[in-house]
Image (cartoon, coloured by chain):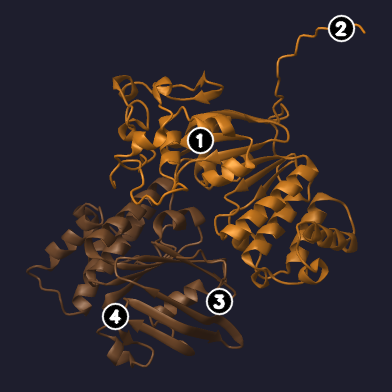
Chain colours: A brown, B orange
Amino acid sequence: MTAPLLDVRDLVVRYGSVTAVDGVSFALEAGETLALDGPSGCGKSTTALTVLQLRRPDAGEVRFEGRELTTLTERELRPLRPRMQPVFQDPYGSLNPRHRIRDAVAEPLKVQGRWTDADGPARVAALLDRVGLDPSYGDRRPHELSGGQCQRAGIARALASEPRLLVLDEPVSALDPSVRAGVLNLLADLQDDLGLGYLFICHDRAVVRHFADRVVRMRDGRISPSSPPR
Amino acid sequence: MESEVTQAPPVRHPSLLSVRDLRVSFVGTEAVRRLSFDVRPGEVLALVGESGAGKSLTARALLGMLPRGAAMSGEIRLDGSADLAAARGRRISLVPQDALSALSPVHPVGEQLAAAVRSLHRVSRAEARERAVAALDRVGIPDAARRARAYPHEYSGGMRQRAVIAMAMLGEPDLVVADEPTTALDAERREQVLRVLAEQREAAGAALLLVTHDLDVVRDHADRVLVMYAGRLSELGPVGEVLNRPRAPYTAGLLACLPQDGPRRRRLPTLPGTPPAPGALPPGCAFAPRCPLAADVCRTGEPEPRTVDGRLVACHRADEVPADTVTLFAEGRPA
């Protein structure tokens, strides 16, 4: 049996004397969407940061593609990082306001040594097209895009790293309903085409019911017993 | 016993606030266009629409709080009087979207409420403090006397929002304007804040103009709804009628793209395209380029609001809108 894409076991994260995440376990397969649901302050965003190893846990394991991440050094993590990418709630806040969209999307390629002047621009254009943005938007800066367009640009940037897992932290909460529907459709299409695993943090129950294969409900740092079974 | 046949009097809705031909423009570009509506005493009127539809500007115009550079024309009357200066902050109050920036970060919350009390009533400082604590207590701030001495950053998001509701109610308003009061809150706190707002409003007998983009909130909390698109009225009527059987294609589209309960369905209907920028409106109906029902007439003349099926609708094709709104927009592709 192959290992799940992501396997989190007995995760504990403390901020000083506060235990923000207290023994959380879940697993996620490629091509699957697992929603983390719960009120503000329940620990879902801390869980997401810890999965990404942007915050190291105080106890527990995070296994990604079968590898235990929590014991790796920063140097050992570096080649794995592109494979797990975050998409955040505020599309404007997650892109540098001074960079053109095409530079924001090109940056992961350059940082990871995958950029060549010969094919780089075409790859950026293809990524923008993939998320439903006309490549001419590459010339713009974030404030010249609508919220939905900006969120699509953020998704294009995440895709540039060729990830296996997207950690989506309230990716549609700031969007108008019609725009939200388009971004949810895009995420569904990308998942179908690329087999991405989604850890989907969202407090909108209707969106969760619509979008997620499974739901883990958190409360006070723990998985709530009221999580719908499956 | 003498039977008496009485002619039922025609239902009359005296208007608390009447808005006629409201226009708000920036350097000649109209962001709110010829908007007319009434708010009835004690009712909850929801104002919905996408970002840029002009709903917040409309709310701000009522409060005399338009941003610098905005020009306004048209008529706003409260109980028939166009002199709103004395009413603003008293008979008309605001619950702002972002309580954290609406409150001063360097003064305790209770002190800010007490200052508001003293701006409204000639009372002693001690009396103002007491009223401030009582107001916080009424909106369910636990241990209000102690919390009154705390600063906004020491409050949770939900508590801050309740504190600004308490502040909005101090002047015993007839109309509360709430501009996206729950946008920043999670589902549980959103319900709690809306419940507090409803309780306070009912206790004061005030009307509420609730600006929101959340149609679930509209369904649960409003009596009537005004749907705006590109600065204009799209549809205005009772919530049940408008949301259960929309007559404006735009309203239908907003409803169609909501995730539905029931079987999991991965592709949601979407509205094709994007709303027009103010100043770059298409000829005719502003929604026509995105409308699956658009006909030639829609591309030449902008529709005026007319009464259809118990509500006002600004659409040439209102009679053609089918009951099944999901199918109407089902083939929408990402814009």
Image height of A126 relative to B207, above or below: below
Name the residue: 47% across, 62% down.
Answer: A202
Return the disc, 3 or 4, that comes first in the chain's sequence: 4
- Name which residue type carries label 1: Val
- Please report, as a chain letter, where disc 2 is located: B
Can you give x and y, in whole percent of width and height, for residue B69 in the image?
49, 45
Per the image, label 1 sits on a secondary structure element best described as strand
Q: Nearer the viewer, mark 3 or mark 1?
A: 3
The residue singled out by tag 3 in the image is: A222
Quadrant position of residue B144: bottom right
Return the disc, 1 or 2, that comes first in the chain's sequence: 2
Is B40 in front, or is B33?
B40
- Name which residue type carries label 3: Arg
Q: Which of marks 1 and 2 is in front?
A: 2
Which residue in the rendered view is the most extreme toward the front?
A: A1
Q: Residues within 10 Å of mark 3 (few under 14, many from 20)?
A: many
